[in-house]
Structure formats: C-alpha cells, structure tokens
Image (tube, rainbow, N blue to C red):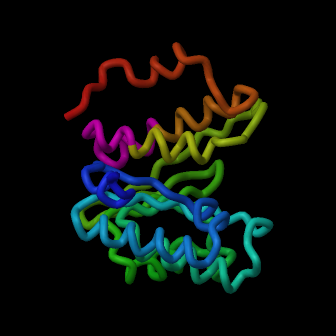
C-alpha cells in the first residue's frame, strides 16, 4: 500500500491551515509538518492559511509554535491580518518583516474588507476590496478566497489578477447562506480561462 507521502509527492499543490494543525495531537502535528517539509523539498508547492481560532488551541504558546512551523514549511502563505494578534503584530510592515525569514515564494495578506496585499520576489501589489453592504453569511469566505486564488495561480493568472478574482468570489460567497453560491454563478467567474 502506498503511504501518504508517496501518494502526495506528485501533487502540484497541497493546502493546509491552522485548523488542520489545531485538531491534531502533538505527535501527529509534528509528523504532518515534517512530511510537508520533505514534500516541499521535493518540489511540491505547500500553501498555508494560519486561520487562527483560539478556541481550538490548548494555549497561545502551543498555537504560536505550531503556526510558526506552518509558516516555515509552506512556500505560499495566505494569512489574514487578524491572525498575527497571536504574535503581537498589528502592522503590515511588521508582519512582512516577521515572515521574510520563512522563505516564502508568495505572501498574500488579507486585511478584512479593506484590501489584500501580495508579495513575491518579483511582484508587489495591493488590491482594494469592495465591501459587501448586504452580507448574508461570511462562513467560508476565507476558504473561498484561498481556493480561488490558488486555482487561479495554477491556471497561470498573475498574482494581482488572482487576488482580484479570489476577492470577487469571496465577496459573492457572502451573499449566500451556507457559503455556497449556485454552480452556474461560480462558473461565470471562470469564463474564458484555461490552464496555462
């Protein structure tokens, strides 16, 4: 039987979050992080959203350690500004400086309903987010953003275009209960796009 690492080493991208880390015991969490590190070293893209939820963690110290390791393992980081309150950081410049030592290829910082910042070795951008005045359900808006951003990058969109598309889908998701928009409406966001 093929083990998990063998099965994943041919993947183009693996996504995990702080919630993934929070629900595991110490041993399983360590094994997962070590496996992801090895997979990254084999060329697999690893994307991480810290998605810090205090209630899921034993204490702040455990969360800081695990999420800090998550930043080190991944090469695509998708945090929100609020995630860094765990580390006592509230300014974007502080956050970028904090993460620079992690060796990311792409850093996407979501600042709520204000804007999204993107950083890589060859690009830097800010995308203003149009607020939704009639939010129905914010559940999974962050997951929708991450999924669409990563999918758009796989399709070959540049960072700014991928952020714009992800922000638009995340906004639309908040118009629907249960965070699931009608399939036809979702398909409209992808008209004209084909994998590079």
Please name the residue shown 29% across and 45% down the image.
Answer: 158
Q: Main secondary structure of the magenta part?
A: helix
| Res. 127 in view | yes
Q: Position of residue 136 (x, y in %)?
A: 78, 31
| Res. 82 in view | no
Which image quadrant is residue 47 in?
bottom left
Would residue 64 be found to the left or right of residue 159 on screen? Answer: right
Would residue 25 be found to the left or right of residue 169 on screen? Answer: right
Q: Position of residue 99 (x, y in %)?
A: 45, 77
Q: Position of residue 169 (x, y in %)?
A: 54, 33
Q: Position of residue 109 (x, y in %)?
A: 51, 60
Q: Is residue 161 magenta?
A: yes
Please name the residue shown 61% across and 78% down the image.
Answer: 26
Residue lying farthest to the front in this orientation: 1
Residue lying farthest to the left in this orientation: 196
**How many numbered marks does the figure carry?**
0
Residue lying farthest to the bottom in this orientation: 61
Position of the C terminus, as image quadrant, is top left
Q: Is residue 51 above or below residue 151?
A: below
Q: Is residue 195 above or below residue 93?
A: above
Please name the residue shown 31% across and 71% down the image.
Answer: 38
Q: Of 46 and 132, which appears nearest the observer?
A: 46
Please name the residue shown 65% across and 67% down the image.
Answer: 22
Would residue 44 be found to the left or right of residue 129 on screen? Answer: left
Q: Of 153 and 58, which appears nearest the observer?
A: 58
Which image quadrant is residue 155 in?
top left
Q: Which residues are magenta?
A: 151-165
Which image quadrant is residue 50 in?
bottom right
Q: Is residue 46 magenta?
A: no
């Amino acid at each position: 039987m093929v083990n998990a690492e063998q099965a994943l080493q041919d993947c183009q991208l693996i996504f995990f979050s702080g919630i993934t880390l929070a629900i595991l015991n110490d041993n399983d969490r360590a094994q997962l992080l070590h496996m992801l590190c090895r997979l990254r070293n084999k060329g697999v893209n690893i994307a991480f959203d810290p998605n810090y939820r205090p209630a899921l963690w034993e204490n702040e110290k455990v969360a800081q350690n695990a999420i800090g390791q998550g930043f080190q393992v991944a090469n695509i980081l998708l945090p929100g500004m609020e995630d860094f309150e765990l580390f006592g950081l509230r300014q974007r410049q502080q956050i970028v400086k904090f993460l620079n030592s992690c060796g990311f290829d792409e850093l996407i910082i979501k600042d709520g309903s204000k804007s999204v910042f993107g950083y890589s070795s060859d690009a830097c951008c800010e995308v203003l987010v149009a607020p939704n005045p009639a939010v129905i359900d914010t559940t999974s808006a962050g997951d929708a953003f991450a999924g669409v951003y990563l999918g758009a990058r796989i399709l070959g969109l540049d960072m700014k275009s991928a952020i714009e598309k992800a922000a638009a889908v995340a906004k639309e998701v908040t118009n629907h209960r249960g965070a699931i928009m009608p399939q036809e409406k979702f398909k409209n966001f992808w008209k004209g796009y084909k994998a590079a």
